[in-house]
């Protein structure tokens, strides 16, 4: 399995053990056919889970998992990531990338490696790449065309443009 994180369980819903899930792609249709998935808890423990039912409610996804029958059991899953095989994740448009793929990339400026992308943060107006620099410090880079040049996930490489000042 080539797993991708597609969402995060944000809490319990109702009295029958339903879970609210936030989709990381913003789309929700790809959740509807799911019959099973993996969940990864905060302690990084992963386990397979059977999906009994999926409903869409606005921007949230409601999911009923086998063996989860009470709000208390559903709340225990809060904060867990939902993973599926890449083939079952939201399809990407040209120029879009999965965050998990970006986090496998190194960041370069003028052919010199700056550091490793370790995450992405929602920053209001735009997303920010979180980079662990090779000197051990952290750097946040706005993920916008003004600062990000070529993104080559196949070769694990993201280029910074001249417009970004490294300090």
Image (cartoon, grey):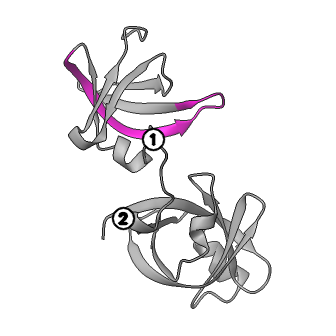
The x, y position of residue 132, in whole percent, is 32, 31
The x, y position of residue 161, in whole percent, is 37, 14
Residue at 52% across, 37% down: 121
Residue at 66% across, 31% down: 124
Magenta span main SS: strand
**Which region is colored magenta?**
111-127
User: Looking at the image, can residue 135 be seen?
Assistant: no
Quadrant of residue 115 in the image? Answer: top left
Q: Which mark is residue 71?
A: none
Q: Is residue 81 above or below residue 122?
A: below
User: Looking at the image, can residue 148 be seen?
Assistant: yes
Q: Is residue 28 left or right of residue 140?
A: right
Quadrant of residue 44 in the image? Answer: bottom left
Q: Which mark is residue 3?
A: 2
Q: Is residue 25 above or below residue 147?
A: below
Quick one: SS at disc 2?
Answer: strand
Q: Which mark is residue 94?
A: 1
The x, y position of residue 88, in whole percent, is 45, 68
The x, y position of residue 63, in whole percent, is 65, 76
Quick one: SS at disc 1?
Answer: loop
């Amino acid at each position: 399995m080539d797993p991708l994180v597609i969402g995060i369980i944000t809490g319990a819903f109702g009295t029958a053990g339903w879970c609210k899930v936030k989709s990381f792609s913003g789309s929700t249709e790809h959740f509807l056919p799911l019959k099973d998935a993996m969940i990864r808890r905060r302690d990084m423990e992963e386990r397979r889970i059977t999906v009994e039912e999926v409903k869409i409610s606005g921007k949230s996804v409601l999911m009923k998992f086998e063996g989860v029958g009470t709000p208390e059991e559903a709340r225990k899953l809060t904060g867990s990531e939902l993973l599926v095989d890449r083939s079952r994740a939201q399809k990407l448009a040209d120029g879009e990338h999965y965050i998990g793929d970006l986090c496998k990339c190194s960041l370069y400026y003028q052919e010199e490696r700056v550091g490793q992308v370790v995450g992405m943060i929602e920053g209001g107006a735009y997303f920010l790449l979180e980079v662990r620099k090779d000197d051990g410090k952290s750097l946040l880079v706005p993920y916008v065309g003004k600062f990000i040049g070529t993104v080559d996930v196949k070769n694990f490489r993201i280029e910074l443009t001249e417009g970004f000042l490294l300090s």
